[in-house]
Amino acid sequence: MGKKVPVIGPTFEEMLHPEKIDPKIRKRAIEMKKKDPLHPVNLFNISWKNENDEFYYFVMPKELTGVKANIIVLYAKEFPSGSHKVGATYSVLAEKTVFGEVDPTKHTLVWPSTGNYGIGGAWVSSRMNYKSIVLLPELMSKERFEIIRKYGADVIATPGCESNVKEIYDKAKELYSNDPEHVRILNQFDEFGNYRFHYYVTGNSMIELVKNKKIGNQRISAVVLGVGSAGTIASGDRVKQEFPEAKVVAVEPLQCPTISLNGYGGHDIQGIGDKHVTWIHNVMNNDAVVLIDDMDSKKMLQVLTDPEGIKFLKEFVPSDAVDFISDKFGISGVANLIAAIKMAKFYNFESDDNIFIVATDSIERYRSVMDNLTKQFGKLDRAEAKSRTERILLYQEPSWIFEGDKYSRERWHNLKYYTWIEQQGKTLEELNAQKSQEYWVNQQEKTKITDEKILEYRQKHYDELMKIYFSD
């Protein structure tokens, strides 16, 4: 692989519509997806669509949700690295590369993360010729640490669990202060490339999917998503522009109810609930926050993926549907599912209503977590699988829901002050500007500028990039 230039992949538009990629490059990317998943041409496989231009999605069987509404799942296990976070990390690094803010011959990238963002950063930076370090809380699943090293990045474990984000920030500051000339921090919590990926690619994918597949009333009634970096929930900003009646609902762990109750605490819904309101979270456009128990999320994931649980589910859910679902969810995806059921009941959604959720990763990140569940509660049997399914899904209550009136939204917004102004050095002027939707529209419009810069960059370095795309 050449080291003369940073490798650049698709534009935002090409990630949304991979059919617009140069056919020769796309054919090569599809070929290398299985042949060599670490080849840089796989950057062109970052999309919610497969090689046949079909979305990675399914509609949850209503036998398993107990609600009338259609719960539509976009699943991310087919993305490079096994999570859609690779789209956010690529977008952040691509923007900084084409605007000349980072240089692989000079800079080491630092990815503050609680999991999938760090994994995505490790995958992307190595494919794009950058050296990188991932910061990850020590209590994350051991699979996460193994994957990061496999992708070619260094990893530093910081104290605590999913919600110990300040410790990650502190380590990032330390690394930067020790070598400010060469260290560059790519923080998912305040980098708007993360926001733009989900606003443009994930949000438009939801809109196109519900229309093209003619699901329900071909509109979107709610987008229900867990917030870690609050990147994915930016899709709701795009959805509300198309369907103003849509509800954008943030999901938090019951054990760490930061936005909803100004709360704190440790939890194990890995990927969400980072004990602060992120800079890129458009809370003024959120309609509600709902709390989900972390143990319920893990216990139901075990039912969906364990042979005994799968066997029980096949008693009342079509067998092929159960098999298809069994490898599509991780812990946060199940949390989103539980939350969607709560919101369907809370808003009295009917059979034509469509709710979107995302399965950020898959069970492959959590085998060790499932093993620990078995050690803690014993081997899963039919009686336990039935009890969990009924309590957690079928008879779930519309509880722990906090709607976003004027003052609620202002409280959610004001929580940003303590992290971002007092600790991270943002300006009060910009914080106040975030109260206006004009601020967010300006961020959204930068997708066009970035796409133009990416196309210019690829044209300028065409010969070198083609050699890399088609290297062995």
Image (tube, rainbow, N blue to C red):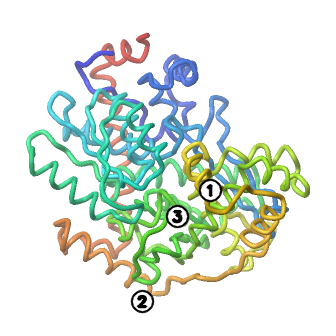
Q: Residue at x 35, y 78 (%)?
A: 413
Q: Residue at x 14, y 49 (%)?
A: 176
* Residue 53: quarter of image: top right
Distance, label 1 to label 2, CA atoms, is 45 Å
Q: Residue at x 46, y 60 (%)?
A: 234
Bin the neighbour count of mark 3 within 10 Å (Cα to Cα): few under 14, some 14-19, many 20 and up: many
The tag earlier along the polypeptide, 3 or 2, is 3
What secondary structure is marked by label 2?
A: helix
The tag earlier along the polypeptide, 1 or 3, is 3
The tag earlier along the polypeptide, 1 or 2, is 1
Bin the neighbour count of mark 1 within 10 Å (Cα to Cα): few under 14, some 14-19, many 20 and up: few
Between marks 1 and 3 in the image, the one whose residue lies nearer the viewer: 1
- Percent position of residue 463, x then y: 32, 13
In the picture of the structure, the residue carrying the numbered disc 2 is: 407
Going by the numbered disc 2, the residue's amino acid type is Tyr
In the picture of the structure, the residue carrying the numbered disc 1 is: 375
Q: Quadrant of the N terminus?
A: top left
Going by the numbered disc 3, the residue's amino acid type is Gly
* Front in this rendered view, residue 207 or 162: 162
* Front in this rendered view, residue 397 or 140: 140
Using the image, tell me which numbered label, if any, was put on residue 226.
3
Task: Tell me: 161 left or right of 215.
Answer: left
* Front in this rendered view, residue 231 or 54: 231
What secondary structure is marked by label 3?
A: strand
Bin the neighbour count of mark 2 within 10 Å (Cα to Cα): few under 14, some 14-19, many 20 and up: few
Above or below residue 197? Residue 24 is above
Using the image, tell me which numbered label, if any, was put on residue 2.
none
Distance, label 3 to label 2, CA atoms, is 22 Å
Going by the numbered disc 1, the residue's amino acid type is Lys
- Percent position of residue 33, x then y: 55, 25
Q: How many marks?
A: 3
